[in-house]
Amino acid sequence: MTQSLKTTVLAQAQMLDFYRQMTLIRHFEERVVELFGKGLISGSTHPCIAQEAIAVGAIAAVSREDQVLATYRGHGQMLAKGGDPKKIMAEILCRGTGYCKGKGGSMHLCDPEIGFLGTNAIVAAHIPIAAGVALANKIRGNGLVTLCFFGDGASNEGVFYETANMAALWRVPLVMICENNGFAISVPVEKAVSVKDIAVRAQAFGFPGEAVDGNDVLQVYEITRKAVERARRGDGPTLIECKTVRWERHSAISAGKYASREEMKRWQKTDPIPRFRAHLADTVRVSGAQLESIEREAREVGDQAVEFALQSPPAAESELAEDIFA
Amino acid sequence: MRQITYSQAINEAIREEMRRDPNIVLLGQDIGSYGGTFGVYRDLFEEFGEERVRDGPLSEAATAGFGIGLAIAGMRAIVEIEFMDFSTLVLDAIVNQAAKMRYFYGGKLKVPVVIRTPAATKLGLGAQHSQSLEAWFMHSPGLRIAMPSTPRDAKGLLKTAIRQDDPVVFIEHVRLYASKGEVPEDEYLEPFGKARIVREGSDVTVVAVAMMVQEAMQAAEELQKEGISAELIDPRTLAPLDRETIVRSVEKTGRLIVTHEAYQTAGIGAEIGQIAQEGAFDYLVAPVKRVAGKDQPIPCGTLQEKVFPNRDRIIEAVRDLMAS
């Protein structure tokens, strides 16, 4: 938790790519929140603002063919896995040009072509599914690894434990990444989790569990890389707890206050993006002009996604009863 | 034609399909050399080994999730739930995941998983091991549901279930496992969505599933002695349901009885009765009757006989209908 960004040495190009992705996700999600405010998003949406370092750092540790499964707070993961921002935004706006023809929406994104096997809106339900995908990798001997993202709340669901046990027994190539953002809707993790670090729960199943600073993209990358290597070697699962905070309400429609103004102010200081920016500027010696150019480009990509989505037609009525059966 | 048991028929279906398709994996509990709680998986572990016959821990919910994961990764999974009553532990995986995944992902994934589970009525096991919960699944779009009553249908429908790319809930019956019937030696498939007219008749249509097909057959034979001709239909699959065969039969007979062991309220009888109302209202000469399980927890011991429908209750109901 106390290690600094400096400890990891990566090629500058890769670090700049991390920064590009993080700023893209941030801008993308800010636009999503804005669009929700304008009544353009059906139902609700679950932004991952302030949690960008986890999606970017962890997914950078796998290849395009490796699989990722995530939660309803999963726009960032899909972007990091190489998802097309336009098609993601279109899906969030339930447009026919979206990844899932506009029928899944913000919480149901999927594209097997990029190894993104879906976001899921039932807490923890995708954990055994991800393990099943990993089991398929093992049976086929294809050397692929599956990353499964879930929240602190999910670590209290029964299938988390059942899956941890089975994944360990069968040594499936699975990396379980818990994004501990401090709250399950409104319930603080201190009131819901019996241990200080969710990571220690892995010990009960005989595989490694490590807690890291989830706002440190390099640390997330490094620890995930090791877990992915372990999984590829055939040594089984790893649990990684990435500690972070959630600035936004659980979902855009969530009512009620879950944190005080002071707490929220304190959290802003942990923002992973300015922190990584400072590292790039001060330690890696990236010029301000270069960083600004990356930021500008990220904003453009996000804005283009919004434009594309807004100009796309809504999900076609002819699609209503399609895709129920193969 | 040779005769084999319902249990052997299921075993053969799985064995043949696993030989044909190396992508098929079995998941469940007690399915290793033990051969399954009711012996349905006899010798499969020996033939296919632990990689494909994965005897796992008592974690039904995760087991079903693993099955779905295998399926979306391009393999095929058959998940056994030892008693249908335990499917409560797996409902999210079946109803919220397998059934809807293809839809909410806009057709991007296929979910070829078969959930096999037996009803276990009248074994004296009481309230938590005696239920027939097929209506719960029928209430969930996105699933295919089979409920065979004969060895021939069990084998042919299961092979179809395994080969299709959609999630299937395959409902067996413990008291049918030992029942024998004719099963062709050559390969065959039975289609989903096609009911079987078990016995033709002209006075009353009886739609029966699973164990109740046998009871209804006995009732029909008894009623024939009284000059009442009953037509017996086994839908075989509940999703898709062959509405047409049921409606056509009711048009002919003007009377309908639906019988199932599951609780009466909101059971499949209610749905099938409504289908008859919608499709053949003008032909009905009497109200549709249900001969179903009582709406109460199932007791063990001799009391259990009182909650389940049987041959005599069907006969009684038919006589009532003919008199009305």
Image (cartoon, coloured by chain):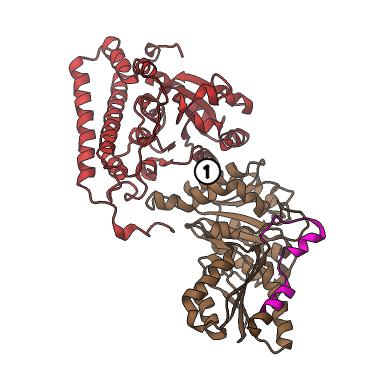
Can residue A192 be found in the magenta stretch? Answer: no
Q: Is residue B37 above or below residue A294?
A: below
* Element assignment for label 1: helix
Q: Colour of chain B?
A: brown
Which chain did the renderer colour red? A
Q: Amino acid at mark 1?
A: Ala
Pointer 1 chain: A
Residue labelled with disc 1: A136
Name the side, left or right, on which B305 lies relative to B114: right
Q: Is residue A213 above or below residue B5?
A: above
Q: Residue at x 51, y 83 (%)?
A: B283
From this viewpoint, which residue is outermost toward the bottom? B227
Q: Nearer the viewer, residue B176 or B241?
A: B241
Q: Residue at x 62, y 50 (%)?
A: B87
Q: Is residue A237 above or below residue B196?
A: above
Local crowd size for mark 1, using a 10 Å CA cut-off: few (<14), some (14–19), many (≥20): many
Q: Residue at x 67, y 87 (%)?
A: B228
**Residue B52 makes an appearance in the image:** no
Q: Residue A39 appears at what percent x and percent y?
A: 27, 41
Q: Residue A43 appears at what percent x and percent y?
A: 35, 43
User: Which quadrant holds the C terminus of chain A?
Assistant: bottom left
Q: Quadrant of residue B203?
A: bottom right
From this viewpoint, which residue is outermost toward the front? B324
Q: Residue A207 appears at what percent x and percent y?
A: 59, 26
**Residue B31 makes an appearance in the image:** yes
**Region rendered in magenta:** B295-318
Q: Is residue B118 above or below residue B190?
A: above
Q: Residue at x 64, y 81 (%)?
A: B321
Can residue B311 be found in the magenta stretch? Answer: yes
